[in-house]
Image: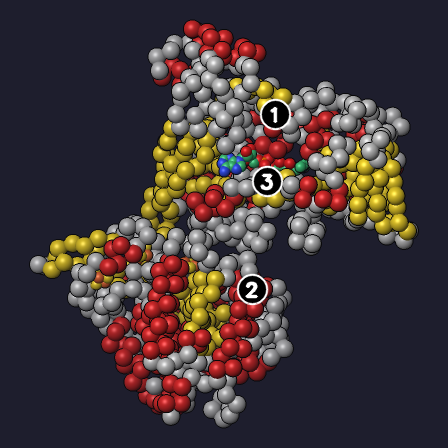
Amino acid sequence: MADNKVWKPKILGMVCNWCSYAGADLAGGGRIQYPPDVRIIRVMCTGRFDSLFVLKAFADGADGVLISGCHFGDCHYLEGNFKAAKRMFMVKRLMKSIGLDDRRFRMTFVSASEGAKWAAVITDVVRTINELGPSPITEFRK
Amino acid sequence: MMVEKKKTTTKKTETKKQEAKKVAPVKQEVKKQAAAPAPAAQNAVAAPGATTQKDARIGVFICHCGTNIAGSMDIQAVQDYAKTIPHVAYVDNYKYMCSMPGQTLIQKAVKENNLTGVVVAACTPRLHEPTFRTATKDAGLNPFRFEMANIRDQNSWVHMHDREGSTEKAKDAVRIAVAKAALLQDLFPKSVPVEPAAMVVGAGVAGMQASLDLAAAGIKTYLIESDMSIGGRMSQLDKTFPTLDCSQCILTPKMVDVGRSEKIELMTWSEVENVEGYIGNFEVTIKKKARGVMTPKEAAAKGIVGGGCNGCGDCDAVCPVIKPNVFEVGMKPRKAIYINHPQVVPLIYTIDFNACVKCGLCVTACGPEKRAIDLNMQDEFIKVKVGTVILATGYDIFPIENKQEWGYKRYENVITSLEFERLICASGPTGGHLVRPSDGQTPMRVAFVLCAGSRDNTGIGKPYCSRFCCMYSLKHAHQIVEKIPGCVPYIFYMDIRSFGKMYEEFYYRIQNEGAKFIRGRVANILEDPKTKNLHVYADDTLLDRPVDMEVDLVVLAAAIEPKADTNRTRKLFGVSCSQDGWLLEAHPKLNPCGTTTAGVFLAGVCQGPKDIPDTVAQAEGAASAASIPIHMGEVELEPYFAQCIEEKCAGCGMCVNLCPYSALSLVEKNGRTVMQVTEAKCKGCGTCGGFCPGGAIWMQHFATPQIVAQIDAFLLGGEE
Ligand SMILES: Cc1cc2nc3c(=O)[nH]c(=O)nc-3n(C[C@H](O)[C@H](O)[C@H](O)COP(=O)(O)OP(=O)(O)OC[C@H]3O[C@@H](n4cnc5c(N)ncnc54)[C@H](O)[C@@H]3O)c2cc1C
Ligand code: SF4
Ligand code: SF4
Ligand code: FES
């Protein structure tokens, strides 16, 4: 692991149990292939995501962060994803103000029946982060 | 059969401790947070921050899932790596971790190695978290000391050709899971009493069967039906395949039983307006739409002794407004005050207030004794409490006129199968005589177009198979051969799907009766404007030649689709839908009646196309599942409640407004304003915890230190 010289993006995904996590499982059931660069942390609802989690991840050296939950109106807890989306905009503004490209942080909506969409989302997230390259924070810490 | 034994036990080594030291700064920070002062002993055993990480001893168990996982990654590499993760005291792997030997292996390891937590790297927690929690519990640990790493559904199955990427991802997943497991606490699910009543929404054959079963089990059941009668689609059918018994003959006795049952409170012309609460304690508001006519019971309540509707129909006779009867697919008229058909249950007339001109003739006809009609009746809202709910809302027919090439609604002699059912039915608009709508003549050549709008990837129709069209079209072919001597059915099909018990035999029977089968999708239908006959154009794919067939009548086996208001219904009950819009079951194979909302179950076509035998089977399954919590008397709720760390709470009250369930409030405690959680209301979404600026909310099982530990484990833990 240590002598792995090629840069591989480090991407954190925080997904809700009811929609996106289920959608990701469905992609598995359908054997829909996508790149393996995202690590998933499961929470009950995207409403659980604290802006600080995202900032902490970037501070720890994440190259990208993805929050994914239910479509608006489908949240298992009514409106957690609305609250999450609000926080997402705030975090994005903060990122811009410190010179961090806000394309590194994304919120998506993938339902329990959208396995193919999940695979497409991950593929696109990985492509974007690959294009953006290593996070400037990691570079700075070096 | 002997099980393969492959065991590699690891004890914590000196080197491991050193590694643990390297990541120490991060861990310390976590620990500090984790050790945050506990809130007042509302939950004495599982006080926030009760566990420090120092003494955690985690066992990691890696599953091969046969070759499902082992085929795509290097299990040995993951195992070797797991041994180096801080706090890991034991690592093992096995072919099927969920099997009996696999679970025994976990229990033995926990006991022999004094483990404090269990990590299983296998499929998905959505499938086997309950299994491994039980195993963890049987090992003598609190079941919430278990954490799962998903290395199958979200790894080996989706990175099948990237062995290295998949192995690295599995290592990270294990490390992330261990970080959380090390901080997990004992939790104790809360038991809540279950309201000893159930609700069934939709009274087609599915809802009726489910209600009858629940009633037979002694459970008070509210059956809610939006139409004026129960029975659903099945009451519109003439005969049913493959046995050809008459639909009314097998359905009406059931309808009568439903109407008569003392345990079933039937509410027709009613809809669900609002749902609150959770399994065991749903509070449902039902809208009783103004029907304009009182039942004898309702009349009695108003002091009209011996009054109320007795179904005599005197009102119907005098009403001047004429409308098409939807039950007869518009082929028969009805009045503004009407019943769908003579066998309705309950036999109570209903006024269509959109059509009624309030002339009052019906009121006079009903007379001063019954006084059943109230033209000023208002919608009524009724609240009931139930423990469990079954959704059985059925289906609609796809608007087949959208497939313009077949000319439905443009050509008079192109009809749908549902119209055919009514025309061939003895109680239908023509008394059972199949006639051409254009001239009332008996058709002698009838074309059946199968998969009309089903298995259609053009974006206009439905991609799925509607599952009963093949079979009912065979039934229709049989019916015309039987009723109209010399009449020839031509069946245009893609494949005949006769998969059920005795279905293939039924198919052979129809072939022998003289039905002609043409394999090919119908491309176009054109009408001869003079004769109103139809030309059916298709490609016979077996003979490889184009077909132009002139027929007298075309019957389109139209696709079916979810009810128009399915989205509204599912949102009321917090149920998801699949891509096609049908209500989503909890698991397609292992939990086909359940949903992701505990206590809400599915029955019948609302979950996906199915014929009557499958509908009834699922209804009985759903009724059984819905009766379990009621018979148990109490259910356990997952203890993912929010807790307030009072020392940190500034009493700002921001969280109070965020909670969608009004579970939070501000209270005075020791001279300070602090937040308080009403656990019975909290559903554990974590929205409050994601916001609190002071970090004062402890989300059980998803606490901030636990999540931060996961993030750190991923991003920092791997850097040696
Ligand atoms: C032309 C045709 C022929 C068929 N022939 C056969 C056959 O021969 N053999 C066979 O096995 N199957 C046959 N079927 C299939 C059969 O109709 C279904 O399997 C069966 O009717 C499904 O029953 P259900 O209770 O799930 O749905 P439905 O019969 O649709 O019942 C649903 C009920 O719920 C009510 N409802 C809907 N939404 C709400 C709401 N929001 N609130 C309250 N109530 C609501 C509806 O009014 C309805 O009464 C045929 C189908 C068609 C179209
Ligand atoms: S948001 Fe946090 S600090 Fe404010 S009242 Fe709620 S728990 Fe207390
Ligand atoms: S976790 Fe969700 S339901 Fe529970 S108190 Fe917080 S916001 Fe309300
Ligand atoms: S449960 Fe999925 S976003 Fe709230």
Counting residues from the N terminus, which is met first, the one under dot 1 or under dot 3? 1
Query: Dot 2 surroundings within 10 Å: few (below 14), some, or many (20 or more)?
Result: some
For disc 3, does the CB lie below 8 Å from ligand 1?
yes
Q: CA distance from mark 1 to mark 3?
A: 19 Å
- Amino acid type shown at disc 2: Lys
Q: CA distance from mark 3 to mark 2?
A: 27 Å
Above/below status of B533 relative to B525: above
Residue at the extreme top: B368
Task: Residue at 44% x, 28% y: name it.
Answer: B289
Q: CA distance from mark 2 to mark 1?
A: 43 Å
**Residue under circle 1?**
B325
Q: In this view of the protein, which residue sits in the foreground, B345 or B420?
A: B420
Task: Residue at 37% x, 51% y: name it.
Answer: B636
- Amino acid type shown at disc 1: Asn
Q: In this view of the protein, which residue sits in the foreground, B599 or B204?
A: B204
Numbered disc 3: secondary structure: strand
Q: In this view of the protein, which residue sits in the foreground, B104 or B45?
A: B45
Q: Are marks 3 and 2 on the same chain?
A: no
**Residue under circle 3?**
B395
